[in-house]
Structure formats: C-alpha cells, structure tokens
Amino acid sequence: MNKISATTLAALTVAGSTLALAPIASADGTSSGSGNSGSGVFTTTLNPVPTNHVAGSGTAKIELKGNQATVTVDAQGLLGGVPHAQHIHIDGQGRCPTAADAGTHNGHKSMSTSDGMKAYGMIGTSLTTSGDNSPTSALAVKRFPMGSSFHYQRTQTVTAKVADSIRRNNSVIVVHGIDFDGSGKFTNVLGASELDPKLPQVATAPALCGVMRGQMTGGVAAGSGGTQGLQHTGLMAGGAALLVGGAGYLVTRRRKASDRA
C-alpha cells in the first residue's frame, strides 16, 4: 500500500497557501505588502521654466534610504546676489510646467509658482541649508542657497508622503528666483508675489524644474512601466497553483490506495 504521510500533506498545503498569500509585486514595481523602507537613487536635469526668461541649468539627485534623503542640487546661470528658494514638490501631475500653464502677471506672460502647481504640485520639502525643511520654511530666504551658481547637499528627514512620492517617480524639484527683465536684480516687473505680497513675483517665480526619476534597489522603479512586477505575479500565482494542486493530487492518490487495501 502506497501511503502518503499526513505530515507531508500538511507541509505541502501550508507551503502552497503561504505562497499564495505572499506579497505580490504589481506592474508598477511596488509590493502590496511592502513598507516604505526601500532605498533608491533618483536624478533629474533641471531645465529653464518656459516664459520666465531663464538661461540657467542644473542637475539634482536624491539618495533615499527609508525616510532619509540626501539631496544634491547643482545650479548655474541664475540671477546672482539673491537667494534661490528650492523645494521638492509633490501631489501634482509629476511634470514640469509648459508655456501653456503660464498666466499673465502685470501685463506679462510668465509662470508664477501657483501657475505651475497643477504640473508639479504642492511643496513637500523645503530644501533649506539648515534647520526646518517643512513647507512652513517655503520662503525662509535666509536659509536657501545664494548666487548665480551653487552646490547644495544635505541629508535630511522627509515625511513618509514625500518619500513615497519620490519612490513613485511623482516628485519634482523646483528652484525659484528669476531675472525677468534682465535688470540683474529682483524688481516689481511682474508685480507682487501671490505667496507673500512683501516679495516681488520674480523672487518666488520658478526658474528651474526637473522631474525626479530613478529606481529602488533591486526592483523596477514605480511608474517606470517595467514588466518585472507582472513576471513576479505570474510566477507566484503559478507556484501557488502547482503546490495546492499537488496537495489535491496526493489526497486523491491516498484515497485510491486506501480503497485498494
């Protein structure tokens, strides 16, 4: 008589059910059972914001480990002698604004911070040089980089929401402060800032913008359209089906053996 032990059958059944319940990777590379503790590197090229008469450029990088972000920004070709507020924006469309997003300010077509928010979203982190980095410090002009060119690097804690937006490739770095009229200083050519009427619009208008793109360590970056998640889903589902099906086969075989005994 060919008997299958109860221990073997139980082991197979448990293995199958465990695999079936394991976190399944989705098509965007995220996991239904994963937390926000992954690491990854995200980079972008900072390009001039349309309509704002900017000739500068730059690059940015975020090295993310859990909620710790080392943010590096290099910019050049900006207005000298003034502070340049910079932020990680989230909750928008994950893009930089186009000329179509611009409004009219003091009779001039230009891009204000508010005009661009549909594209890049609200402020998630203020990239200050020291101290608080929350949206509350959005206009802390004394704690932002100064000059026509600068190198910024700071390791800082970001909120879980900001970290998740970075992982999902839905964060945008924006550097502010423009020389709209070529005067070499902040003027009232565009009127007062809608963020703080004590400041001119040119001081808070976006100058450079870049969408952060990258990849979590060991997986396809969220939102990148990779197929790794789909492959994992199929493999896990197939493996679970084989194990559960195998357990059923063993039950049937054991019953037949008992009938012949």
Image (cartoon, helix red, strand yellow):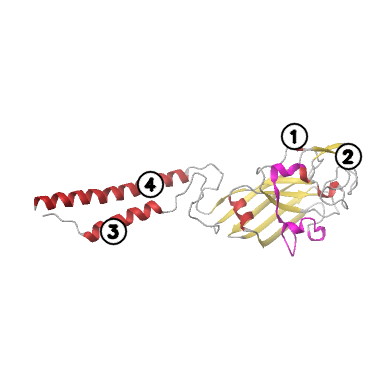
What's the residue type where badge 1 is placed?
Ala
Earlier residue among tags 4 and 1: 1
Residue at the image point whose x is 17% and y is 52% from the top: 254
Magenta region includes residue 199: no
Q: CA distance from mark 1 to mark 3?
A: 62 Å
Q: Residue furthest left?
A: 261
Instruction: Give the structural element (helix, strand or loop) at label 1.
Output: helix
| Three-letter code, disc 2 | Asn
Q: CA distance from mark 2 to mark 4?
A: 60 Å
Disc 1 target residue: 100
The answer to whether residue 148 of the structure is visible from this angle is yes
Q: What kind of element bears circle 4?
A: helix
- Sequence order check, earlier mark of 2 and 4: 2
State which region is magenta. Answer: 115-143
Quadrant in the picture for the N terminus: bottom left
Residue 255: percent from the left, percent from the top?
Answer: 16, 51
Q: Name the residue that disc number 3 marks.
A: 11
Q: Residue at x 65, y 53 (%)?
A: 61
Q: CA distance from mark 4 to mark 1?
A: 46 Å
Q: Considering only order in the chain, which callout, 4 or 3, is on the residue closer to the N terminus?
A: 3
Q: Which residue is identified by label 2?
A: 106
Point out residue 18 in the picture as x, y percentages from the top left corner: 37, 55
Residue at label 4? 237
